[in-house]
Image (tube, grey):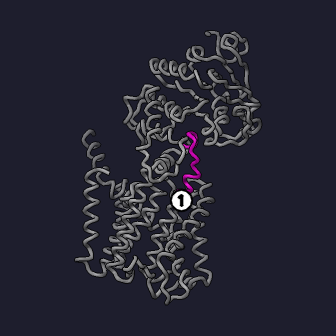
């Protein structure tokens, strides 16, 4: 991380920390939702940007954890314990990722994209076509999980408290993934993205590395999915549909791949742009499409790579 | 240390490698020559586990291995280089070698230890760059290296994994005279405690360093033996070397 980036990150963190002091409830809830999506996007970035595995089924792990919150409760009116239901949900997502990954990672490139899509659609239809948790209509959850922290108890129903909990979640996930990327494991993942054949010739069991990355990414996506369900108080099959997978992929691409910060910036950019455009016109999807195309064409390295793109462009125009 | 026993590889109707047997011994440079399409690179790919054989087997220290994969072979101490420079272009020369050295280290799953603080892989990488004469290009991104430097990096990465058998696929291809000379010197030094298979088109280099030469034509072994015997072999002269040698 360069010094400018570090300064920008600290400023962003301070602004986020201070936001509930001056912003209205609507924005506090919106930003909390974005922070959840940012965690989700970072988990996908580990696959797409770092390891070079383009998955179009990442919503399966996000959505499964959402459903686990509902399934863990005896009924819609009983609060579950955060400290038991959260690990359960994350474990379920990790396990699903392990199974799907073990099969999907036998394919490569465009086949990998199709196979991950197919598996996630299977999970989608399990929840869509069965009576499990409300079928295609989904289910409401009228109470938030109980989160006792020693003598004090976190009220996840309170916008500001939930907001700060999500800020902590975002920062902790970011730091965990950064640590992982700096480790030998992380370097090996980048090597796989760069040249998998060479990695194998050097003695790396690339399948095991990719499977581990896929499982970790699934677990973190589950973390995000669990809190998304806590916030909305509602789950439905759309949470694990391919739209959701495409949406989060778009966040990673918009922000810039492979550096985690890009996934966070992408999540903010996409959701805020949606919010802005939909307030302007009911044909906002058209504007949204234009925005995405403009970013991809003008900033091939994403929003966080804008400085780099600008420097390249300046060098080219100078020398040319 | 590594041997081929009746190794055969067919691609459809084409027999690319036809019942080839040879043995690589410690402290010996075994050169493999032959025209383009003779099956030399396919043989390396078979020995390195990149391709499964159609018949026959590779033997590591006498143990036959069927359907071995490249990562298994590498872990058994069989290092290979590629005919076309096959490096991590986004990484610096040093990072390429450090990643290579990391391959055989234990505790690969220690997620909390930063890779840049791993002393043993950093030391192995520094040594490997020094051996091939790339120390000055330590921090240069691989994509900015010259062709000759990339060939050298290719060898350095292989050495960083500390292999006991080296399979070198045309290491001198496209190198200048001075660079070639340096690599030839390097091969002589590496020979002392390793077995080396050298696929090479540069005949001056081959006859300068090889202890044993095997000649391949149309996938099969045409001749094999000491350099002088191979040089004198009439079938080899006719099929490959020409009268100039």
Q: Is residue A193 visible?
A: no
Q: Quadrant of residue B195?
A: top right
Q: Which residues are magenta?
A: A199-212
Q: Is residue B217 visible?
A: yes
Q: Position of residue A18 (x, y in %)?
A: 25, 72
Magenta span includes B115: no
Q: Chain of mark 1?
A: A
User: Relative to residue B225, is residue A234 depicted above or below?
Assistant: below
Could you tell me which quadrant the C terminus of chain B lies in?
top right
Q: Residue at x 73, y 21 (%)?
A: B222
Q: Nearer the viewer, residue A170 or B145?
A: A170
Kindly give the residue lying farthest to the front in the view shown: A151
Relative side of B59 to A113, left or right: right
Q: Nearer the viewer, residue B7 or B12?
A: B7
Q: Residue at x 33, y 70 (%)?
A: A273
Relative side of A282 to A205, left or right: left
Magenta span includes A208: yes
Q: Position of residue A37 (x, y in %)?
A: 41, 69
Could you tell me which quadrant the N terminus of chain B lies in?
top right
Q: Position of residue B70 (x, y in %)?
A: 62, 41
Question: Where is mark 1, residue-wise?
Answer: A214
């Amino acid at each position: 991380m360069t010094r400018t980036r570090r300064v920008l990150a600290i400023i962003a963190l301070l602004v986020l920390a201070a936001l509930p002091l001056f912003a209205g409830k609507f924005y506090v809830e919106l930003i909390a939702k974005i922070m959840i999506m940012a965690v989700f996007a970072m988990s996908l970035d580990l696959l797409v940007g770092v390891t070079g595995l383009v998955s179009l089924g990442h919503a399966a792990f996000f959505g499964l954890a959402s459903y686990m919150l509902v399934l863990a409760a005896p009924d819609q009116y009983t609060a579950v314990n955060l400290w038991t239901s959260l690990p359960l949900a994350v474990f379920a997502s990790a396990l699903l990722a392990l199974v799907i990954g073990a099969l999907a990672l036998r394919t490569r490139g465009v086949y990998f994209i199709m196979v991950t899509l197919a598996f996630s659609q299977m999970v989608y239809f399990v929840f869509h076509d069965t009576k499990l948790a409300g079928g295609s209509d989904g289910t409401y959850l009228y109470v938030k999980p109980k989160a006792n922290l020693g003598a004090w108890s976190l009220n996840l129903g309170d916008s500001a408290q939930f907001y700060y909990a999500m800020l902590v979640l975002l920062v902790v996930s970011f730091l965990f993934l950064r640590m992982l990327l700096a480790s030998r494991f992380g370097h090996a993942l980048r090597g796989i993205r760069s040249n998998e054949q060479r990695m194998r010739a050097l003695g790396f069991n690339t399948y095991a590395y990719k499977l581990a990355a896929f499982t970790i990414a699934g677990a973190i996506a589950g973390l995000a999915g669990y809190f998304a369900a806590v916030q909305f108080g509602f789950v439905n099959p759309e949470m694990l549909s391919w739209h959701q997978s495409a949406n989060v992929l778009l966040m990673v691409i918009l922000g810039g791949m492979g550096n985690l910060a890009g996934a966070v910036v992408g999540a903010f950019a996409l959701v805020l742009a949606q919010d802005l455009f939909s307030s302007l016109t009911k044909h906002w999807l058209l504007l949204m499409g234009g925005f995405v195309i403009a970013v991809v064409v003008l900033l091939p390295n994403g929003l966080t790579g804008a400085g780099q793109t600008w420097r390249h462009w300046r060098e080219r125009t100078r020398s040319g | 240390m590594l041997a081929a026993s009746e190794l055969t590889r067919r691609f459809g109707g084409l027999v690319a490698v036809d019942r080839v047997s040879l043995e690589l011994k410690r402290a010996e440079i075994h050169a493999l020559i032959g025209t383009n399409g003779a099956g030399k690179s396919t043989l390396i790919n078979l020995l390195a586990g990149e391709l499964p054989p159609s018949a026959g087997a590779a033997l590591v220290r006498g143990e036959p291995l069927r359907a071995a994969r490249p990562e298994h072979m590498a872990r058994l101490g069989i290092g290979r280089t590629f005919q076309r420079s096959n490096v991590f272009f986004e990484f610096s020369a040093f990072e390429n070698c450090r990643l290579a050295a990391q391959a055989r280290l234990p505790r690969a799953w220690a997620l909390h230890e930063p890779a840049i603080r791993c002393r043993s892989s950093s030391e192995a990488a520094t040594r490997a760059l020094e051996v091939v004469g790339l120390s000055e290009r330590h921090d240069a991104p691989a994509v900015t290296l010259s062709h000759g430097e990339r060939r050298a990096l290719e060898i350095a990465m292989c050495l960083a994994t500390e292999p006991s058998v080296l399979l070198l696929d045309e290491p001198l291809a496209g190198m200048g005279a001075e660079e070639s000379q340096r690599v030839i010197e390097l091969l002589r030094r590496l020979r002392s405690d390793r077995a080396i298979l050298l696929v090479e088109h540069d005949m001056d280099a081959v006859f300068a360093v090889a202890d044993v030469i095997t000649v391949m034509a149309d996938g099969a072994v045409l001749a094999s033996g000491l350099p002088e015997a191979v040089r004198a072999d009439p079938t080899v002269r006719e099929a490959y070397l020409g009268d100039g040698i």
